[in-house]
Image (spheres, helix red, strand yellow):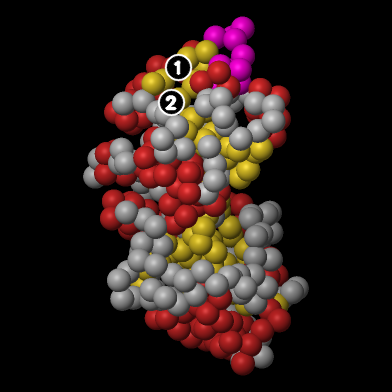
Amino acid sequence: MTNSDLYPTDRLAAAAKAAAEAGLDALLISPGADLRYLTGYEALPLERLTCLVVPAAGGGDPFLVVPTLEKPAAEASPASRLGIDITGWGETEDPYALIARRLPKTLGRFGVDNHMWAEKLLAFGRAIPGAEAALAGGVLGAMRMIKSPAEVEALRTAGAAIDRVHAQVPQWLRAGRTEREVGRDIADAIIAEGHVRVDFVIVASGPNGASPHHEVSDRVIERGDAVVVDIGGTTHDGYCSDETRTYAVGEAPADFLAYYAVLERAQQAQRDAVRPGITSEQLDAVGRDIIADAGYGEYFVHRTGHGIGLETHEEPYIVSGSTLALEPGMAFSIEPGIYLPGRHGARIEDIVVCGADAGEPVNKRPHELVVVDA
């Protein structure tokens, strides 16, 4: 798979067309996932402005403005094959004024990426007085939600890499070790198995497992603990992995085993329910209803899932209240959980891609509770 597969040249034209349809005269995109999606350039998020300008369809050609000292990096990136102008600006220049001069004189409304720094947005407001700023997330999020075949393959690669890490977890998970010690082993393996960056490591043992976003601590893992291990990173392709499995160190408590069986059934039902046309809230309800009917509804405290791609969390979100219908190419997590405060918790998570008829999990590790020697 090449950069041209992951970052095709037609995305800029599609973004320009979508901007026009959304009533935006231009898109201003600073470093982050949106810039990478449109150009393949992973720019450093600096105080110096880097900005991709995409005029709406019919309003001119896209161009990229970068600090002069970053211009060689921009020209060495996949952005160089897009045929767009890459302009450097010097330390004593005003890049906001430079961009304003090149924008259409009739510009009335422009969109910025959702993660643009506030100081940059305010500087654009001063440079383009009278123009209205809006979020470009609705435009670019809709594009990024539907993964191309190359992106799906990148997610498969990421899924296989994190599977290989989970396969090694039982050798590190032992009574007497701290969560932090186990987390360090996992982080090293994430890099060794094909990631360029560790995005997060959760090793939540015993009562810490009841906190969905617990990371690691100096708590010593004990015999009889249930342990939630949720891990992910970014691969060489720039796409993310994310997978949760729950382990037991020795024999787990009986009340934990009772609800873990419910959780397995709920997660399986949700994976089986993935298909084009089902809405996000309907998919959420498939598992939530099973958990609620078993008496654990109040302990499933978060949404079922989140989209994934160039970011670990992106659209679509699988959550109650979302009427978004799934389409082929959408990729997202399915990760129901049950958490009993002060006692223990459990979560099972796979990344699933919606196909033409059903869902394809990119994670292949078994879902049953993994019991390791104490």
Q: CA distance from mark 2 to mark 1?
A: 8 Å
In the rendered image, the vertical position of residue 43 relative to residue 93, given as above or below: below
**Residue at the front extreme, as displayed:** 106
Q: Nearer the viewer, residue 214 or 111?
A: 111
Is disc 2 surrounded by few (<14), some (14 to 19) or many (20+) residues within 10 Å?
some
Is residue 93 shown in magenta?
yes
Q: Which residue is mark 2?
A: 63
Which residue occupies 55% across, 18% down?
Answer: 101
Q: Mark 1: which secondary structure?
A: strand
Q: Nearer the viewer, residue 289 or 92?
A: 92
What amino acid type is highlighted by mark number 1?
Thr
What amino acid type is highlighted by mark number 2?
Phe
Q: Which of the labelled discs sits on residue 87, or is there none?
A: 1
Q: Is residue 139 left or right of residue 125?
A: left
Q: Residues in magenta?
A: 90-99
**CB under 8 Å between discs 2 and 1:** yes
Which residue occupies 55% across, 72% down?
Answer: 323
